[in-house]
Image (tube, rainbow, N blue to C red):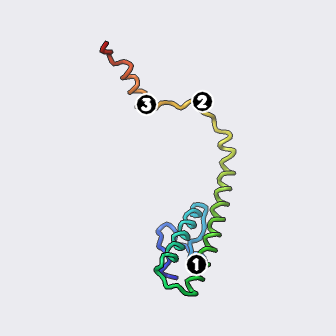
């Protein structure tokens, strides 16, 4: 199993089974990690035997758990942002950037050839 672990400088804490511990910022990273692990297990690199099936099953279980954690974190973030978005002032129109405004002004002020 050690051959399947990846090194990550930003996350060194490992939970059960060697998988990275979940944090609110790492929930999506956990899903990515387990998807990559599952892809490697299914790549044909390892001999097909009962141990491989057990590793695949464990990885699928861990991926399912990571997906549930990620979804819960996303729901919490969305709930926290709702009141902020509701209180934010609405912009009626989108303003042109300074660069675009200057270009339009140059076009309007250019002498006409007719």
* Badge 3 density bin: few <14, some 14–19, many ≥20, Cα 10 Å: few
Q: Which residue lies most toward the bottom here?
A: 50
Residue at (56, 78) in percent of width and height: 18
Separation of residues labelled 3 and 2 (CA atoms): 18 Å
Separation of residues labelled 1 and 2 (CA atoms): 52 Å
Q: Nearer the viewer, residue 59 or 70?
A: 59
Separation of residues labelled 3 and 1 (CA atoms): 55 Å
- Badge 3 element: helix
- Badge 1 element: helix
Residue at (66, 65) in percent of width and height: 68
- Badge 2 element: loop
Q: Which residue lies most toward the top here?
A: 114
Q: Earlier in the sequence, mark 3 or mark 2?
A: 2
Judged by depth in the image, the label closer to the viewer, 3 or 1, is 1
Q: Position of residue 89 (x, y in %)?
A: 63, 35
Q: Nearer the viewer, residue 69 or 84?
A: 69
Judged by depth in the image, the label closer to the viewer, 1 or 2, is 1
Q: Quadrant of residue 26?
A: bottom right
Q: Which residue lies most toward the left here?
A: 113
Q: Earlier in the sequence, mark 1 or mark 2?
A: 1
Q: Quadrant of residue 74?
A: bottom right
Tag 3 residue: 98
Tell me the number on the disc at residue 56: 1
In this rendering, would 27 be left or right of 47? Answer: right
Tag 2 residue: 92
Q: Nearer the viewer, residue 59 or 73?
A: 59
Q: Earlier in the sequence, mark 3 or mark 1?
A: 1
Q: Position of residue 84 (x, y in %)?
A: 66, 44
Q: Position of residue 5 (x, y in %)?
A: 50, 76
């Amino acid at each position: 199993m050690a051959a399947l672990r990846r090194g990550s400088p930003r996350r060194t804490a490992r939970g059960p089974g060697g998988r990275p511990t979940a944090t609110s910022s790492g929930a999506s990273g956990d899903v990515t990690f387990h998807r990559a692990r599952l892809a490697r297990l299914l790549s044909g690199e390892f001999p097909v035997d009962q141990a491989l099936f057990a590793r695949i099953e464990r990885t699928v279980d861990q991926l399912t758990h990571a997906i549930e954690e990620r979804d819960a974190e996303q729901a919490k973030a969305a709930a926290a942002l709702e009141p902020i978005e509701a209180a934010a002032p609405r912009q009626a129109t989108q303003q042109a950037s300074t660069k675009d405004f200057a270009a339009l002004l140059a076009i309007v002020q250019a002498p006409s050839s007719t």
